[in-house]
Image: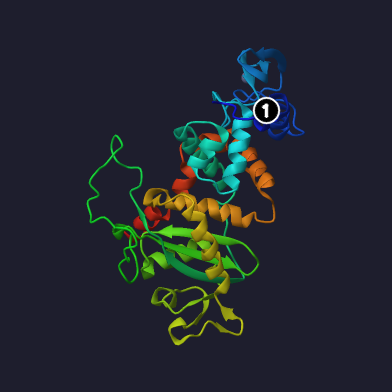
């Protein structure tokens, strides 16, 4: 079941290994990933991994290859599997879809998906917007998907939502399975999207401090949490009075971003609130690198995945954790 069609066989293992080799070392000379010695010699190949070259380090007297200490290290699957998965991830495929297209188990594609999303988020860690920034908020339904112990039915601990049932009116909250998503959109093009527990003044202030440079111009709607913000030149439009733009002042870009985020999240057929921050974070990466096509985005992610420091942090899910403003904001409030 590993290779599905003749199309998959066009992905030549040798070509993939040469590509990964160039992507990892570029112009740099070969270096041992363990002791960083440059005194290395070729050391044959692996009989069970066609195309993967092995090297001998004269410093620590051990062997290594192009994948040692990267995200792809010791993977049972071939490089074409990984490269295809990364590409499909950039096309916003769900792990179910990736499992089907690539021919791996869904648990594999789910795990890889999160590792690769973490690697992608390494590009987004220190992003901060300045200049003119628009902000808007959204409440997305996110429950406890996939958290039943041992699988199968489990009691929800609440009334089931029911199909087509109208959600409770008003602002959502993490505890009501409707966490908030705040989008900050710079008029220069960059975006930051944060998933937060609620939409209180403290939360929004903290979120703004992380996302937007102090002293920037901020255009929002008339929500009271925005009006209480300090440190920004703030102007707002009043949607209840049917005012959507007043000259320069509008937040249409932020609303447009949500119109793209909603169908992106829909692909997953419901997300868990624990994973929401990771999904919107990856969407932020895709938006910020939207000048590149999916192939180039996949290359960026693979490049990050081949960096040993990023790889070890990505496997632990540290980037999404840094990105997860649920916890961050909670500590800020306490
Ligand atoms: Zn070494």
Question: Where's residue 238, x and y in %?
Answer: 47, 83
- Circle 1 residue: 9
Q: What residue is at 64 percent from the left and 64 percent from the top?
A: 189
Quadrant including the C terminus:
bottom left
Going by the image, does 284 lie left or right of 317?
A: right
| Side of 44 where 118 appears, left or right | left
Dot 1 alpha-carbon crowd within 10 angstroms: few under 14, some 14 to 19, many 20 or more: few
On screen, residue 136 above or below 30? below
In the image, residue 213 above or below residue 303: below
Name the quadrant where ligand 1 sits: top right
Q: Is residue 58 left or right of residue 233?
A: right
Helix, strand or loop under label 1: helix
Q: Quadrant of the N terminus?
A: top right
Query: Where's residue 84, x and y in %?
Result: 62, 37
Q: Is residue 60 shown left or right of residue 223?
A: right
Q: Percent x, y for residue 322? A: 46, 49
Quadrant in which residue 57 is drawn: top right
Residue 307 can be seen, yes or no = no
Q: Is mark 1 within 8 Å of ligand 1?
A: no
Using the image, determine if residue 253 lies above or below residue 67.
below
Residue 89 in view (yes/no) = yes
Residue placed furthest toward the bottom = 241
Between 190 and 202, the residue placed more toward the observer is 190
At x 57%, y 34%, the residue is 102
């Amino acid at each position: 079941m590993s290779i599905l069609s003749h199309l998959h066989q066009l992905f030549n293992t040798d070509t993939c290994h040469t590509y990964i080799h160039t992507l990892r070392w570029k112009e740099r000379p070969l270096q041992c990933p363990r002791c960083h010695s440059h005194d290395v010699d070729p050391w044959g190949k692996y009989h069970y991994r066609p195309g993967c070259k092995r090297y001998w380090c004269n410093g620590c007297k051990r062997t290594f290859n192009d994948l040692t200490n990267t995200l792809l290290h010791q993977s049972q699957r071939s490089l074409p599997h990984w490269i295809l998965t990364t590409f499909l991830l950039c096309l916003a495929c769900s792990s179910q879809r990736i499992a089907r297209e690539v021919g791996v188990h869904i648990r594999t594609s789910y795990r890889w998906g999160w590792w690769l999303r973490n690697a992608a988020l390494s590009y987004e860690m220190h992003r901060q917007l300045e200049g003119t920034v628009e902000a808007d908020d959204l409440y997305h339904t996110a429950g406890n998907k996939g958290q039943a112990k041992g699988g199968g039915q489990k009691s929800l601990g609440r009334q089931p939502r029911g199909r087509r049932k109208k959600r409770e009116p008003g602002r959502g909250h993490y505890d009501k399975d409707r966490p908030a998503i705040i989008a900050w959109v710079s008029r220069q093009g960059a975006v930051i999207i944060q998933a937060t527990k609620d939409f209180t003044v403290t939360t929004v202030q903290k979120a703004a401090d992380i996302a937007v440079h102090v002293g920037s111009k901020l255009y929002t709607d008339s929500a009271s949490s925005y009006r209480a913000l300090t440190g920004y030149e703030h102007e707002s439009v009043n949607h209840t009075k049917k005012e959507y733009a007043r000259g320069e002042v509008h937040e249409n870009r932020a609303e447009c971003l949500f119109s793209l985020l909603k169908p992106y999240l829909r692909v997953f057929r419901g997300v868990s609130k624990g994973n929401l921050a990771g999904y919107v974070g990856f969407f932020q990466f895709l938006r910020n690198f939207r000048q590149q096509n999916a192939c180039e985005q996949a290359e960026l992610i693979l490049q990050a995945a081949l960096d040993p420091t990023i790889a070890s942090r990505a496997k632990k899910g540290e980037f999404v954790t840094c990105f997860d403003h649920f916890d961050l904001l909670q500590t800020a409030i306490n």
